[in-house]
Image (cartoon, rainbow, N blue to C red):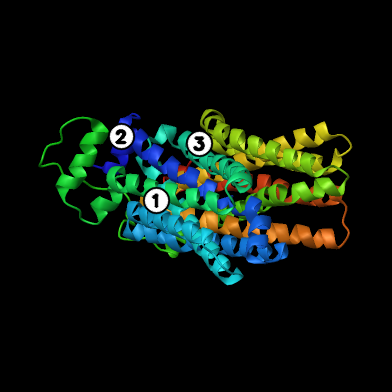
Amino acid sequence: MNVVKLIEESPLGAFQIRVFGLCALVALIDGFDSQLLGPAARSIAQSLDLRVADFGSIFSASQVGFFIGALVFGPAADRWGRRRLLIATTSVFAIFTLFTALAHSFGSLLLYRFIVGLALGGASPSFIGLAAEYLPLQRRTQFVTILWAAVPLGGMLGSAASTALIQTAGWQASFYIGGIVPLLVALLLIFFLPESISFLVTQGASPARVRAIVEKLTRAAIKHEDRFIVDTPEAQGASLKELFARGRAVPTLYLWALCFMAWMALIVVSFWTPTLIQNVGFSASAAAATLLFNNIGAVVGTVLIGSLMHRFGHFRVLILSFFASAWAVGALGVFTAVFSHVAISSTLAGFFLSASCAGLIAIAAGSYPVSIRSTGIGWAIGVGRIGSIVGPLLAGHLLSLDWSVRDIYLALSVPCLCAAVLVILLRHSASSRARSGRDAFSVG
């Protein structure tokens, strides 16, 4: 019995929904935890006698940790088990979020947030890969993008909670919540989250353990003499070179370039827009409202993109989304005379940029064989994180060169246009692979 085909062809049932729900819960607290530091930075600086400028290094340490975590723990999840890695990384970012509340110096704060970023980055490939594996093929894109929407939704909740709790209970309170809740979620994972069934089969787990999962999937008794197999020839283990084997080199590089440009534009818009909007004369409260509109657009776009890709085609929708992103980002710099125009542009930029990023995650989750899926997802996210580090630095450099707000946003629209062209090339590569009958990058 081929367990991969069994899952892909099975109807969506309670067992798959349970797996998806647990993975979505991790995604939610991932986003929640990642947004706690920003609103609390000024209060922490006062408490620890630090400069607010010192938090640039702390934010960067978290981003670097996320980047390393995605690259290292993606392949590790394919080798050692996604359930095991997800429980471990969730526990680690919970513990070090609690430690953040106890930080007493710049060095300790820097170390704790680096480790939190490392664990958050490591969790992402595991919760995406595990959820994708247990989803029917026809519903995978829709549900993976909904799963990814839990991250910005959690970020909104984390930012709001941190802002509210600073006024009533001190900055430490949000980090206590951000640590205790993930520990409780880790307990849920221990008791209710199954391991990747393909991993169990390839690692030679007992037939009884595999049979128990299959019976929950099919809701029918399985004969004891049935043998379980997977259909991927690379099932002996994952490594970076497998992302470039069997003709996957070109589409993998296209995907990485797309992730770099998409996350660069996404993070620049979310990180720099409040400052740039104030530079053209709007108040701090208007800048905060602009960021809120951007986040709302991000959540809605991420939720909807999966259904649109499923209905109209993965690549067709993604091409249009990147072209729309270029227009919306450019509009942010051009239509700055009236706040309502800025708010609309910010909402649309959040919608299309986040939708594009979620679409890329869905393509990564659906394109690689199950044996290297977490590796593929981890490297795609990791390369995207490089863009999220480079983008804000580049925008800050352009601002120091006295570039106008208009010109900065117009320059940022160029990577979005390039990404649309790259999706066209990726579609051509995927079509060629589909015609040749090869296994990866045949979505859409």
The label shown at residue 160 is none
Asked whether, in this view, residue 21 is left or right of residue 360, the answer is left
Q: Secondary structure at mark 1?
A: helix
Please state the horizontal and vertical placement of residue 23, each as a whole percent of the image.
41, 43
Packing grade of label 1 (10 A; few <14, some 14-19, many >=20) is: some
Please state the horizontal and vertical placement of residue 276, each as a whole percent of the image.
81, 49
**Foreground: 66 or 236?**
66
Instruction: Mark yes or no: residue 190 visible.
Output: yes
Packing grade of label 3 (10 A; few <14, some 14-19, many >=20) is: many
Asked whether, in this view, residue 29 is left or right of residue 290, the answer is left
- The residue positioned 73% from the left and 42% from the top of the image is 288
Compute the Cα span from label 1 to label 2: 23 Å
Q: Is residue 62 above or below residue 408?
A: below
Which label sits in the foreground, 1 or 3? 1
- The residue positioned 77% from the left and 57% from the top of the image is 395
Identity of the residue furthest to the left in this view: 225
The label shown at residue 146 is 3
